Image: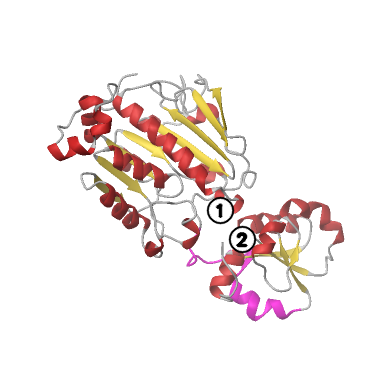
Amino acid sequence: MRPVVDRREPLTKDEIARYSRHLIIPEVGMEGQERLKAAKVLLVGTGGLGSPLALYLAAAGVGTIGIVDNDIVDASNLQRQVIHTTSMIGRHKLDSAEHAINEINPHVEVVKHATFLTADNALDIIEPYDLVIDGTDNFPTRYLVNDACVLLGKPNVYGSIFRFEGQLSVFWAEEGPCYRCMFPEPPPPGMVPNCAEGGVLGIICGTIGSAQATEGIKLLTGIGEPMIGRLGLYDALEQRWMHVKVNKDPDCPVCGEHPTVTELIDYEAFCGMPAHDREESEQASDLEILPTEYAEDWSQREDVVLIDVREPHEYEISRIQGSVLIPKDDLPGKLSELDDAKTYVMQCKSGARSLEATALMRNAGFKAYNLWGGINGYARQVDDSIPTY
């Protein structure tokens, strides 16, 4: 495989000492290390996957690391996002990541893109980079990254994580399949929860993120066989990798013989779900009530029932007094037990699952509203004694 980077940047005496363990590997040597120094890599996100990616690519001597992120460090990040520390809680993730990278390797240039990747900015942001590594946790951004990379001819190192499992591949339309060849359509909204809703064993981020960094270095230097045309499936509970062949789809709408996707589209509409969690400043919809509304008025009404649609193990973490636990997947079978004269307020962790439950209730003829922001929103706005997670 030809190296993605055809440029070389001479090493200084200090850099030769720093990268000496690379330089004595014949497959890397001076040429490979100078390609790494000349390389420009874009990381989409500095969360669970982006953290080990940024740390190891910086330590390896990648000359320019661009980061796209517009999030703030939260205490709940620290279980897996190892680039951020307790002292950085409340700071922008970009600033936290830059600080950590500079501490590891001051020779690396960090380019900060303080925004979320969208169809409006993706092509401009990605274009200057040699390689994109996707560390996102949602389907709209994955399809966006894929399509932008295909349109620009850039390789895309893909990784995903959920609970005890991970996935790894390299999508490069010039050499093999793209993400859409493997997943032509996104899953139905709500079918696949993200890590915020379903959880993830923090160590998995290191496993998959490090593997992504390995694939990135192989691509940049032209060593080894990259994961093009293969999907790696990792099971931490069995400590096992399985590989599945992925073929290029000649009918792929973006990289096929007759593409129909020739420009970036509305990926939230395509996937039927938001790309990012909503900010608390956003207003509730007509289907929702604010936590303060519930606490000050609705909770006092005898005709109102608060239904918690989370799982039992989540209910053990935190709960709103008076709530009734009916997990979302059990709700369809419980409808016949509910009183249609009551008004129901549906609640989950952050408001996503309960919004689906609200729609289910309304379709069944019940008066139902979603508690905007879920129990975490209620804890922030009403009762700070309730733990957030």
Which of the image's four quarters has the C terminus?
A: bottom right
Disc 2 target residue: 349
The residue positioned 29% from the left and 50% from the top of the image is: 112
Q: Position of 354 compared to 182: left or right?
A: right
Q: Residue furthest right?
A: 336
Which of the image's four quarters has the N terminus?
A: top left
Decide whether residue 284 is among the magenta residues: yes
> Which segment is the magenta one?
278-301
The label number, if any, that marks residue 196 in the structure image = 1
Marks 1 and 2 in Cβ contact (< 8 Å): yes
**Mark sitting earlier along the chain (1/2):** 1
Question: In this picture, is 322 found above or below 8?
Answer: below
- In this view, the residue in front, 111 or 337, is 111
Type of the residue with mark 1: Ala
**Quarter-wise, where is residue 107 in the image?**
top left
The residue positioned 86% from the left and 60% from the top of the image is: 337
Q: Is residue 124 visible?
A: no
**Label 2: element kind:** loop
